[in-house]
Image (spheres, coloured by chain):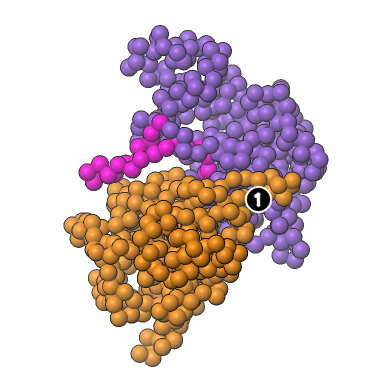
Chain colours: A orange, B purple
Amino acid sequence: MRKNSILLIISVLFLTIACKNENEKQTEPIAVETEVTLTGPLPSWNEGKTKSAILDYVQDVTNSESNNFIPISERISTFDNDGNLWSEQPIYFQLSFVLDRIKEMAKEHPEWKNEQPFKAVLENDMETVMKSGMKGIGQLLMTTHAGNTTEEFDALVKDWISTAKHPTKNVGYDELVYQPMLELLAYLRANDFKTYIVSGGGVDFMRAFVSPVYGIPSEQIIGSRITTEFDYNDGNPRILRTPGIDFVDDKDGKPLNIQKIIGKKPVFSSGNSDGDLPMMQWAASNTHKSFMLYVHHTDAAREWAYDRDSHIGKLDKGLDQANKDGWTVIDMAKDWKVIYPFELTD
Amino acid sequence: MRKNSILLIISVLFLTIACKNENEKQTEPIAVETEVTLTGPLPSWNEGKTKSAILDYVQDVTNSESNNFIPISERISTFDNDGNLWSEQPIYFQLSFVLDRIKEMAKEHPEWKNEQPFKAVLENDMETVMKSGMKGIGQLLMTTHAGNTTEEFDALVKDWISTAKHPTKNVGYDELVYQPMLELLAYLRANDFKTYIVSGGGVDFMRAFVSPVYGIPSEQIIGSRITTEFDYNDGNPRILRTPGIDFVDDKDGKPLNIQKIIGKKPVFSSGNSDGDLPMMQWAASNTHKSFMLYVHHTDAAREWAYDRDSHIGKLDKGLDQANKDGWTVIDMAKDWKVIYPFELTD
């Protein structure tokens, strides 16, 4: 176990280097490769067919002697965020931000005490909040996400993420990222893959804090968006966030947004729900050898266990297609030595 | 003049290296820097205040000892395309594609001989085409741009660009790119700027051919878009281009799309028309020292001369603001030794 702990600590150092390089351009690619060789890639992954499948794929497509070699410019990898790079239970973390923000804003809205769906939020009555459906949740979303500038919203999210705690794990939400997936992102980047987030979550919400966490710059974060307007504002221009849905980056929206923004089909795609299935199907149709990776939440002890019947992160049709087409499915309980980075010091 | 010719030829080699690196990641940044030192940057630019302003800015903000130093991750540069990186007269080149494509498609549409606006296109009656206004031109645009898959459209544009000739210059449209701007793009990249196209032109039209021309990968090309749909197509998924406007990347649309897709404010912005003005204003409001560059078409002999009264690439309010706020304005006739790359061998 001692040797293992050292490997994990070295791995964190390696991740720090790799992330730094992604943000600041890889000026020392050789140094990164050396680290990989010394520590072995994916140290928080147990040996087995999942880890082997990933390593075999990357080694194959980056080998210029291989028939499956993929040029660097085509090495596009896309990752869902909620339930794939960080947890998503008991509610999407962005919804926790919404609820916390409503409580904060309520100080200036005494009328909300008697007005649904705000009343239910203030009374922590989640059943009524959920029953308010698309209309009620949409109203909460627009109340908290619109009516400000991009800079103001960015500051609100930064402030929230630096103080809010997860209700049961009792750590910051940004600590609930998956250590094995951080290693996978870094491993792909060390092999000259571009790593993208393609999430149903809000793009400006994610951009406020995930770049240093995942080592992914804002221009490689794709997500859902509300409408915006440009305001010249007498020479101090700003972008106003207005109450309307601009794009929902989920289901078919994922391959559509990938085409709109990247303009290349991914060769590596990773998700955890049926909402990711069209993105996986899109990657699977690449003429290059591609890799489809599903995270299966099987770990009730360390994280959560859910799939076909869950209302959050439902994985049903996706699991069927993964099994049918031989995509790689992570068995979280079996494949991952640790779930979160803070477990590394245990 | 002999020395000058050699410099220009070396510059082309340098451009080739720089473009290759942009597409395949800069694995040899030191080699590129050496080339810059040997040849001097921007060889097709005449000495003078425009060239000096560019060089002074880049040297200042990339100097880690300077108060104006900009971290690499923030070095975002955005370039309009039509009239800024290539010519746009007598009509936008994408419109030439539309007209040529209508003539090609007419073989299967005999009814178009009697149906406007198609009849006017087939009779080369540009006055009637233009008079058909947004409705008529919109119809031509959708007829040629929609009703196919992204792959099919890509192939159509590639086929067109490899054969079509400009009506008066009698060379391929992709030869009508500005040599001094190619050098500027390469110079910025050699100084670790990310170079983006942010154009009113269609994003999928541009992506079909501009990457090797400008050294800009598809994920750094931003433009207007028509609507799309994902079609699983029994396991051979495709993206269908449908007849609707998804986003117009012009005027206020430029800063809005920059925020949506890049999520960072540019520090260097280059355009040639009032349609680029909001993008320039957005860059001008950067807390980092920023650089706004307008191309002023002053060269009737070698290219075209037009500004305030032009219906294509009108530069009026933008010129006023550039003069008022001290932005850099390229006087094409005075500042550029050559316009197009093919003039280098003269």
User: Could you tell me which quadrant the N terminus of chain A lies in?
Assistant: bottom left
B188 or A112: which is nearer to us? A112
User: Could you tell me which quadrant the C terminus of chain A lies in?
Assistant: bottom left
* Residue B8 lies within the magenta run: no
Residue B274 is situated, as x and y percent measured from the top left of the image, at: 67, 34
Residue B16 is situated, as x and y percent measured from the top left of the image, at: 56, 45
* Residue B226 lies within the magenta run: yes
Relative height, residue B242 to residue B55 (above, below): above
Can residue B192 be seen by looking at this rendering? no
Can residue A95 be seen by looking at this rendering? yes
Name the outermost residue toward the bottom. A2
SS type, badge 1: strand
Relative height, residue B185 to residue B131 (above, below): below
Name the outermost residue toward the front. A114
Circle 1 marks a residue in which chain? A
Q: Based on the displayed image, in which of its 4 quarters is residue A137 positioned?
A: bottom left
The residue lying at 74 percent from left, 60 percent from top is B68
Decide if residue A24 is on the left or right side of residue A135.
right
| Kind of residue at badge 1 | Arg
Highlighted magenta segment, given as a residue range? B221-243
- Secondary structure that dominates the magenta span: strand
Q: Which residue is mark 1?
A: A238
Relative height, residue B173 to residue A295 (above, below): above
The residue lying at 31 percent from left, 66 percent from top is A295
Q: Based on the displayed image, in which of its 4 quarters is residue B62 positioned?
A: bottom right
B269 or A209: which is nearer to us? A209
Residue B305 is situated, as x and y percent measured from the top left of the image, at: 71, 24
Count of residue discs: 1
Q: Based on the displayed image, in which of its 4 quarters is residue A89 positioned?
A: bottom left
The residue lying at 30 percent from left, 42 percent from top is B231
The residue lying at 68 percent from left, 28 percent from top is B314
